């Protein structure tokens, strides 16, 4: 007998088969573990204590201890300020830690400078921080930068206290402890600034809004023909910035239907191809003398870490010149390096990005790329 | 040794003037070839050469000499002519390389698998090459009753267990993040290059949790922790672990993970942003509440228009990008052009990709390369005949849940433009009349 239910079942099977043809589900099965033996051993309490260092928002995992703002300032100056600035204001190496929160934020638990109307130049750590456990945990596990996990619990309490003091959350004479940290949580400027009401958590743990089946908050159009759009280019890369990532011709394959755009030279669109000027040979550029470059090095504090012939904090200029003598793009590379800083090329001491004009960084780079600096 | 008499292909050294010559059909080697090449490509109109090609008539050294022996390179390396294909940094994005990013050269890749040496990098406190004989994985609970026994596994044991192998994309939550406000970078390497796709091999985390006797009724979240300086931590939902999606992986594209990608052990969390795929995985803690780690509070939280941050946003939503032709490239000639790109979704398999060459007025359905796999890159291609007019190239992906990739306007209407993370907007490339391709955003 004909059955609509059977038909529906058949249709479903056909649809599944059709889907299977185009979409290969990676659904290999992994059986139960009952047949697997002899894998692993029990972790000892000492081993767990050595690695289980995380601190949760409810402060589970927080060790006993105490540290004052005053102690924190001392540790800060010795171990943290070189990267983050004396008042955690620096964005030279990492993004700025403290700033742009106020008393009202501490009262209400929402940071006003995160609003759309705000005109702060960047967002700081204390603007975003919603749980003080996060701050304690990360200082403890990852700081200082070159010697993570070297601070004792009391020192982590002290550094945390100092940062919260800089953000005007706790007073100058405050001592942060495992006992009062839950009270401090109630003063964190952005403590009410987080929401989990969204469809981007891949589970159901936060309630109905979440999960892979939840409806996303955005949806594109399915229009295929004569769609009601009026495409106007509103943003593009200015011509002068096309070479900011280096010569794009050298970042593409040498064969195929496309090539990389040669961005090393100014655009020559207005020059007739036949009349294109010949490249000026390098020899035609007059050599820059060390005496000429000296005042520029002084003015930009380069000489605090570099000397012409001797290694100080950083490599000798002579060594830099030697290293890049054969590199054709040395002047461009070094000009960029002076401005962006770097680490690892000459050892572990990082060079901070230098606040220097383009013209001067180029001149120094040109001097270095001559192959010798005499 | 390669003979110095080997002449490099002149195509590799095209100047802008050369390209102009080519696109105008004036290159000396050819005689008016490209004007005729435009029309239908009938046999009669095939380009003919004014003189014989020396690459054919003068036999090259490699046809007249003895080549190199086996195992000259015990671990093979790409051709010397492929040196341009490298992962690169975006200048000024980060100030220290140990907490920096290098981008995958998507513009030059084929298919869906990323060569391991070109896999994008994101480190939080520098990378290490860890001795696998000394690496351990510990699993414990946030309290003593969360599991029957906290355990330690060696790499020997993990490799002895039955394994699973699956292919998945990994995308940094901040991929395309520089472009939320406006166009900022020139090529697809920098707009979308915090994306890679590999075949991963490992053990389902669920199996290890069972060996530990986890109380699956109480457990809701898992903390994954790395062994590097930052000891990177992230919260993972247990529901995703229980269906065997989450792997404790040691294999990548048939060999061990590369050190830059977490050797000897990393978490694989399909569909979820790369930061959760904790590298140098040393510890799993099973718990009953989320952990609010540094990169769940200070980073990887999405600032909305009302000043609230969305926390624990993890899924990488439906997205696609045309990789060729793409920003910073030059089309050498008019006529046939194979548009090619990749599409992916953290919610499942790609169902369809549509391509527009007129800024979104009209769309055509692209061909998908099979197999199309869940939470994996899918390669798409579509034929196009470039007339030489300015064109706006876009691709739009649809996943199996029916989620359609939004435009910048659609995304910004909901999420604003101040975010850093989860930018899955439709990418537009402007092909100028000169053949130059530019990264642009439309109104």
Image (cartoon, coloured by chain):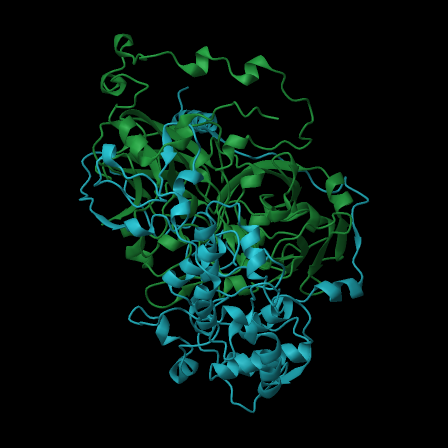
Chain colours: A cyan, B green
**Residue, x 77% and y 41% (percent of image)?**
A36
Q: Is residue B288 above or below residue B46?
A: below
Q: How many marks?
A: 0
Q: Is residue A224 visible?
A: no
Which corner quadrant holds the N terminus of chain B? top right
Percent position (x, y) of residue B183? 32, 51
**Left or right side of A173 for B418:** left
Q: Is residue A246 above or below residue A101?
A: above
- Give the farthest residue toward the bottom: A173
Percent position (x, y) of residue A284? 38, 47
Q: Nearest the camera: B270 or B337?
A: B337
User: To which quarter of the image does residue A144 belong?
Assistant: bottom right
Q: Nearest the camera: A357 or B323?
A: A357
User: To which quarter of the image does residue B227 belong?
Assistant: bottom right
Q: Is residue B211 visible?
A: yes
Q: Nearest the camera: B300 or A158?
A: A158
Percent position (x, y) of residue B417? 32, 58
Q: Is residue B112 above or below residue B177?
A: above
Percent position (x, y) of residue B33? 27, 17
Q: Is residue B4 above or below residue A347?
A: above
- Give the farthest residue toward the top: B44
């Amino acid at each position: 007998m004909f059955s609509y239910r059977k038909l529906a079942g058949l249709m479903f099977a056909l649809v599944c088969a059709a889907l299977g043809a185009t979409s290969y589900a990676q659904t290999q099965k992994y059986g139960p573990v009952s047949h697997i033996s002899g894998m692993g051993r029990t972790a000892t309490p000492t081993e767990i204590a050595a690695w289980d260092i995380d601190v949760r928002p409810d402060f589970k995992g927080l060790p006993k201890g105490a540290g004052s703002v005053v102690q924190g300032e001392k540790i800060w100056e010795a171990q943290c300020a070189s990267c983050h600035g004396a008042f955690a204001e620096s964005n030279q190496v990492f993004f700025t830690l403290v700033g742009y929160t106020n008393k009202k934020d501490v009262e209400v638990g929402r940071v006003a400078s995160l609003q759309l109307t705000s005109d702060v130049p960047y967002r700081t750590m204390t603007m975003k921080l919603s749980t003080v456990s996060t701050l304690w945990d990360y200082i403890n596990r990852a700081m200082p930068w070159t010697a993570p996990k070297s601070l004792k619990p009391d020192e982590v309490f002290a550094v945390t206290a100092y940062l919260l003091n800089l953000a005007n959350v706790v007073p100058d004479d405050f001592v942060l402890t495992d006992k009062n940290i839950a009270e401090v949580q109630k003063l964190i400027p952005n403590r009410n600034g987080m929401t989990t009401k969204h469809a981007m958590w891949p589970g159901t743990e936060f309630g109905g809004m979440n999960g892979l089946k939840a409806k996303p908050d955005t949806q594109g159009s399915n229009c295929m023909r004569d769609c009601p759009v009026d495409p106007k280019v509103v943003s593009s890369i200015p011509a002068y910035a096309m070479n900011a990532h280096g010569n794009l011709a050298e970042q593409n394959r040498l064969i195929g239907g496309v090539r990389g755009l040669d961005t090393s030279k100014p655009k020559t669109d207005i020059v007739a191809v036949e009349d294109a000027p010949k490249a000026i040979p390098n020899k035609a550029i007059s050599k820059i003398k060390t005496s000429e470059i000296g005042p520029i090095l002084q003015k930009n504090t380069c000489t605090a870490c570099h000397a012409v012939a001797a290694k100080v904090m950083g490599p000798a200029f002579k060594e830099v010149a030697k290293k890049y003598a054969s590199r054709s793009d040395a002047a461009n590379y070094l000009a960029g390096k002076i401005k962006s800083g770097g680490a690892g090329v000459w050892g572990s001491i990082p060079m901070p990005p230098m606040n220097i004009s383009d013209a001067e960084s180029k001149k120094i780079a040109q001097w270095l790329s001559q192959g010798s600096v005499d | 040794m390669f003979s110095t008499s080997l002449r490099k292909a002149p195509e590799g050294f095209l100047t802008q003037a050369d390209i102009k010559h080519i696109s105008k059909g004036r290159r000396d080697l050819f005689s008016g070839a490209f004007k005729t090449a435009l029309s239908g490509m009938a046999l009669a109109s095939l380009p003919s050469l004014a003189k014989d090609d020396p690459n054919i008539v003068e036999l090259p050294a490699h046809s007249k000499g003895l080549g190199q022996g086996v195992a000259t390179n015990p671990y093979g390396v790409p051709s010397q002519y492929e040196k341009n294909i490298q992962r690169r940094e975006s200048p000024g994005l980060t100030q220290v390389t140990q907490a920096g990013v290098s981008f995958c050269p998507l513009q030059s890749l084929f298919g869906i698998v990323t060569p391991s040496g070109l896999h994008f990098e994101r480190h939080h406190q520098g990378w290490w090459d860890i001795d696998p004989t000394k690496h351990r994985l510990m699993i414990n609970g946030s309290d003593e009753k969360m599991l029957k026994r906290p355990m330690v596994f060696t790499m020997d044991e993990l490799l002895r267990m039955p394994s699973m192998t699956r292919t998945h994309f990994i995308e940094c939550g901040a991929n395309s993040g520089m472009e939320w406000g406006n166009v900022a970078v020139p090529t697809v390497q920098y707009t979308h290059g915090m994306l890679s796709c590999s075949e991963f091999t490992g053990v389902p985390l669920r199996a290890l949790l069972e060996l530990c006797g986890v109380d699956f009724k109480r457990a809701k979240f898992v903390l994954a922790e790395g062994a590097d300086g930052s000891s990177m931590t992230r919260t993972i939902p247990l529901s995703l672990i229980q269906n065997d999606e989450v792997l404790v992986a040691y294999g990548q594209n048939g060999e061990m993970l590369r050190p830059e990608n977490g050797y000897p052990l990393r978490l694989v969390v399909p569909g979820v942003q790369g930061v959760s795929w904790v590298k140098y995985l040393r510890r799993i803690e099973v718990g009953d509440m989320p952990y609010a780690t540094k990169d769940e509070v200070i980073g990887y939280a999405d600032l909305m228009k009302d000043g609230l941050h969305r926390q624990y946003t993890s899924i990488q939503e439906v997205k696609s990008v045309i990789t060729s032709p793409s920003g910073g490239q030059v089309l050498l000639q008019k006529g046939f052009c194979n548009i090619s790109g990749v599409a992916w979704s953290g919610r499942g398999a790609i169902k369809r990709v549509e391509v527009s060459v007129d800024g979104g007025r009209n769309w055509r359905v692209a061909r998908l390369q099979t197999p199309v796999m869940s939470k994996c890159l899918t390669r798409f291609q579509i034929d196009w005949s470039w007339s030489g007019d300015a064109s706006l190239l876009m691709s739009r992906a649809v996943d199996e849940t029916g989620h359609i990739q939004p435009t910048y306007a659609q995304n910004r209407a909901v999420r604003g433009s101040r975010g850093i993370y989860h930018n899955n907007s439709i990418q537009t490339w402007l092909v100028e009349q000169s053949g130059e391709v530019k990264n642009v955003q439309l109104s």
